[in-house]
Image (cartoon, grey):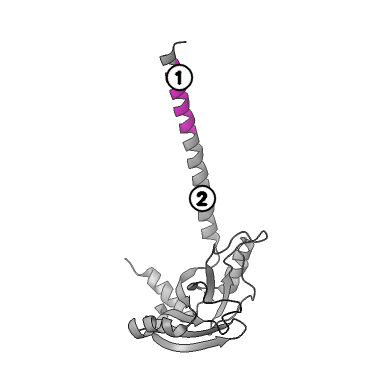
Amino acid sequence: MNLPLRQAQDRLLRQAQDRLLRQAQDRLLRQAQDRLLRQAQDRPFKVLGIQQIAIGGPDKQRLRTLWVDLLGLEVTGNFVSEGENVDEDICALGSGPFKVEVDLMQPLDIDKKPAVHTTPLNHVGLWVDDLPLAVEWLTAQGVRFAPGGIRKGAAGFDICFVHPKSNEAFPVSGEGVLIELVQAPPEVVGAFARWAQVPA
């Protein structure tokens, strides 16, 4: 067989293999997307929106200089917990059911854990419409939760945390981000439901 014919056959074979590989990858991608869509449709709860962000530093007064004094957030409360090694100012951004809490945190003891100041963006809080159902369903999906279970949070809502690291028993985590799930009160659930129905 002459060389140009052999090269043409090899090129056609590679093109056919590439086409088959792309088709197989597309099929796998469609199957994964279909599986995720089915899971989303079967999800028995809704994440409604951002409830809070928590920012940590060794001295919360320095955080207040930016967030309160310069950006104008309102301090609405304070929360101190020896068990969670935190002294935090609870601030508000926005109003009504769409208000976002911004927590400015410092440790009570800089040498103890949890070290709320070592990750400046400490955690993100998400409103959910049914916290117990969310925890049950997510646990069944392999999501790891931080110790402590569902409990009252600093702002008085029931909360729990998705762990930032996975383990062998629970392979799904926040991948480095601590995520707080917060039970939305009825007025927040209602406001988000009304907002979702407004035409764009």
| Residue occupying image coordinates x 41% and y 77% | 191
- Identify the disc placed on residue 34: 2
Q: Which residues are magenta?
A: 6-20
Disc 1 target residue: 9
Whole-percent x, y for residue 56 in the image: 49, 77
Extreme residue in the front direction: 111
Extreme residue in the top direction: 1
Which of marks 1 and 2 precedes in the sequence?
Answer: 1
Against 39, residue 79 (above or below) is below
53 vs 149, left or right, is left
| Residue occupying image coordinates x 47% and y 32% | 18
Give residue 139's quadrant in the image: bottom right
Spatial CA span between label 2 and label 1: 37 Å
Image quarter where the C terminus lies is: bottom left
For label 2, count other residues whose C-alpha is less than 10 Å away and answer few (under 14), some (14-19) or many (20+): few
68 or 196, which is in the foreground? 68
Give residue 72's quadrant in the image: bottom left
- Identify the disc placed on residue 105: none
Give residue 92's quadrant in the image: bottom left
Q: Amino acid at mark 1?
A: Gln
99 or 188, which is in the foreground? 99
Against 199, residue 157 (above or below) is below
SS at mark 1? helix
| Residue occupying image coordinates x 47% and y 73% | 120
Against 165, residue 17 (above or below) is above
66 vs 155, left or right, is left
Whole-percent x, y for residue 82 in the image: 60, 85
Q: Main secondary structure of the magenta part?
A: helix
Q: Amino acid at mark 2?
A: Asp
97 vs 133, left or right, is left
